[in-house]
Image (spheres, grey):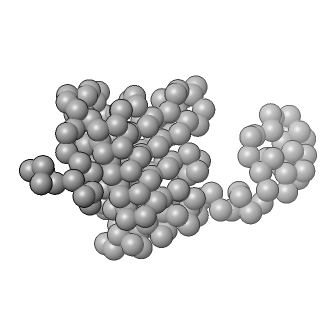
């Protein structure tokens, strides 16, 4: 397929597009993946089904993860987005791993993180890591990595305090017993 595309573009005197070197199955899979990721998956009311389809598309998602409806996970390179175990991503969150003059950079959300509704995570040129047991406030814009055990809010997101609470499900109790 790529040989045919290259020949057609050379005959027309135009530069060969980047996708001419892709195999045929990938050229056919990309629009299907885009349709699943943007139209179908965000509207499914069952979390287990959303997670299964996100994994099918190529995202790395751990166990016991909740991803709310109406979320957009950047599907240009799904393997660049990693979500560890016990993460909660509220409704309407947006993740992007690529942009103008930046290439594809990773987004990594570590264990026990919580992202409030309509949070946007933009990987930028260096990528973004949201640390363990972090809480990101609603409508925050995460442009840089957030360290472990922090609360971050705002546009752009800033760390406002260290989170003193133990991760959900740990044996530590709040009253020190």
> In the image, residue 19 lies at what x, y percent?
74, 46
Q: Residue at x 27, y 51 (%)?
A: 167
Asked if residue 68 is positioned above or below residue 15 in the image, the reply reads: below
Residue 68 % position (x, y)? 31, 60
- Image side of residue 159 versus residue 94, left or right: left
Q: Nearer the viewer, residue 120 or 83?
A: 83
Question: Which residue is pictured at 33% across the width and 51% down the height?
Answer: 112
Q: Is 31 rendered above or below residue 128? A: below
Give the residue at the far left of this rendering.
Answer: 175
Q: Nearer the viewer, residue 102 or 168?
A: 168
Give the residue drawn at x 45%, y 35%: 128
The image quarter containing residue 40 is bottom left
Residue sitting at 47 percent across and 43 percent down? Answer: 108
Furthest toward the front, the residue is: 177
Q: Quadrant of residue 104?
A: top right
Residue 91 visible, this orientation: no
Q: Would residue 177 be visible to someone looking at this image?
A: yes
Q: Is residue 14 above or below residue 59?
A: above
* 8 on left or right of 51: right
């Amino acid at each position: 397929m790529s040989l045919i595309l290259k020949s057609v573009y050379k005959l027309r005197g135009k530069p060969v597009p980047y996708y001419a070197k892709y195999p045929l199955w990938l050229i056919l899979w990309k629009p299907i993946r885009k349709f699943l990721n943007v139209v179908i998956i965000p509207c499914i009311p069952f979390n287990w089904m959303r997670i299964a389809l996100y994994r099918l598309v190529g995202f790395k998602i751990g166990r016991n993860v909740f991803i709310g409806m109406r979320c957009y996970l950047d599907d240009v390179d799904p393997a660049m987005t990693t979500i560890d175990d016990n993460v909660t991503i509220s409704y309407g969150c947006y993740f992007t791993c690529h942009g103008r003059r930046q290439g594809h950079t990773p987004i990594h959300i570590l264990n026990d993180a919580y992202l409030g509704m309509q949070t946007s995570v933009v990987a930028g040129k260096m990528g973004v890591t949201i640390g363990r047991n972090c809480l990101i406030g609603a409508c925050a814009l995460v442009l840089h990595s957030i360290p472990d055990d922090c609360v971050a809010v705002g546009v752009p997101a800033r760390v406002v305090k260290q989170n003193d609470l133990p991760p959900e499900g740990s044996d530590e109790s709040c009253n020190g017993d």
